[in-house]
Image (cartoon, rainbow, N blue to C red):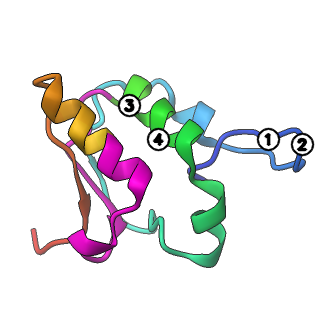
Amino acid sequence: MLSLRNTSTNRPGYLQHLSGLKQLKKLCGSVSAETAETVVTIGWAEVRWMDQNWPELRQADFFEEAISVSEQFRWLQDKRKSEGRVPLETYMYDY
């Protein structure tokens, strides 16, 4: 669901269908970036896409713990911080 189309692997991708959600602030539920599939399908292109298309995203349940956050998402968190933008938490916590 959270991957872009990849013609070289014949992966359809669905992320582009969510581009209209410019005001999205929270993404919860079955959006883990730690499953066997998403570990290989959510990469730099997807994280850059999220940065461009979801500028208001503040919380996404991609990882179970802060220590598990991938390099790509750490980059995004640092980028937003350095630009003075909305911070992004990418791990699950009690609401």
Is 15 rendered above or below residue 59?
A: above
Which region shows up in magenta?
55-75
Query: Which residue occupies 33% across, 64% down?
Result: 69
| Amino acid type at mark 2 | Ser
Q: Secondary structure at mark 1?
A: loop
Is 37 rendered above or below residue 82?
A: below
Magenta residue check for 62 = yes
Circles 4 and 3 in contact, beta carbons < 8 Å: yes
Horizontal arrangement in the rendering, residue 89 relative to residue 60 (left or right): left
Horizontal arrangement in the rendering, residue 11 relative to residue 65 (left or right): right
Circles 4 and 2 in contact, beta carbons < 8 Å: no
Q: CA distance from mark 1 to mark 4?
A: 15 Å
**Horizontal and vertical percent position of residue 77:** 24, 43
* Res 16 seen here: yes
**Horizontal and vertical percent position of residue 55:** 29, 27
Lower sequence index among marks 1 and 4 = 1
For disc 4, the marked residue is: 47
Magenta residue check for 50 = no
Q: Nearer the viewer, residue 2 or 77?
A: 77
Q: CA distance from mark 4 to mark 3?
A: 6 Å
Q: Quadrant of residue 93?
A: bottom left
